[in-house]
Image (spheres, helix red, strand yellow):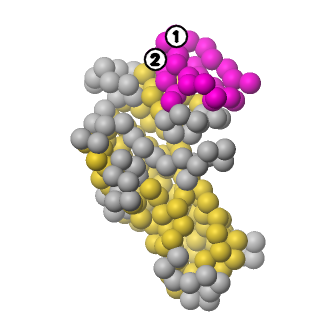
Amino acid sequence: MSVFAGQNISIEKGNQNTLAVGNGLKIEGPNMGTAVLGRNVYTNAMGLHYGGGDRVSAKEGNQQGGLMIFANATTFTAAGNVLEMVLGNDTITRLEIQDETAIVCSYILHASDAVGLFIYETGSFYLDKTGGVTLASTPVVLSADDSGTALTLAFSIDTATNTAQHRFKVTSGGAGFPHAAVRVVLSVNYNQIR
């Protein structure tokens, strides 16, 4: 069941369990369970997105913020294993922002298994898309800790595999392999200007 209240709401078919309250709201792509609130919000990514109106420009989503959760799990068998974190369960989705978009993000990266391993870090990064090509800053780590495990994870943002997308990845390092059933969750709180 979805809930819609407001004006000028455009939700692409197939987005069940969606909340849209406000004016000038738009969801594209397979993003079931997404919430859009406020005024002038555009998204093609699952999450919570809220709009602040259209004071700075008339572009969709020109002054909005939100929260997106990326996740995945694997067994790290050696140093150098790469795990990509994605949005959603029903359809694997990568972040593909609109052209002429600048986003500043704060993040929490958390990894854990069933036997006491934990790794977390907080930080920030910048995303941009101009002329159909993405760029990203190197994530700046603000704080980090772990359970004393031999496993390390290096967080990176890949814009080379597909220049229209931002792909969030961790690469394993350290020792003591294999590290089984490691779950990794990346929470991205963002502020967007278009």
Secondary element at tag 2: strand
Q: Which residue is mark 2?
A: 24
Residue 53 x/y as whole percent: 39, 21
Residue 116 x/y as whole percent: 72, 76
Residue toward you, 139 or 141: 139
- The residue most toward the bottom is 176
Quarter holding residue 35: top right
Residue 54 x/y as whole percent: 35, 20
Residue 125 visible (yes or no): no
Q: Which mark is residue 7?
A: 1
Residue at image position (34%, 59%) is 160
In the rendered structure, the answer to whether residue 179 lies left or right of residue 163 reads right
Residue at image position (49%, 49%) is 94
Q: Amino acid at mark 1?
A: Gln
Residue at image position (46%, 46%) is 95
- The residue most toward the top is 7
Mark 1 touching mark 2, by CB under 8 A? yes
- The residue most toward the left is 131
Which comes before the other along the chain, label 1 or label 2? 1
Locate the N terminus and report the quarter of the image it occupies.
Answer: top right
Residues rendered magenta in the picture: 1-28
Q: Is residue 101 above or below residue 57?
A: below
Q: Amino acid at mark 2?
A: Gly
Main SS, magenta residues: strand
Q: Is residue 13 above or below residue 130?
A: above
In the rendered structure, the answer to whether residue 31 lies left or right of residue 144 reads right
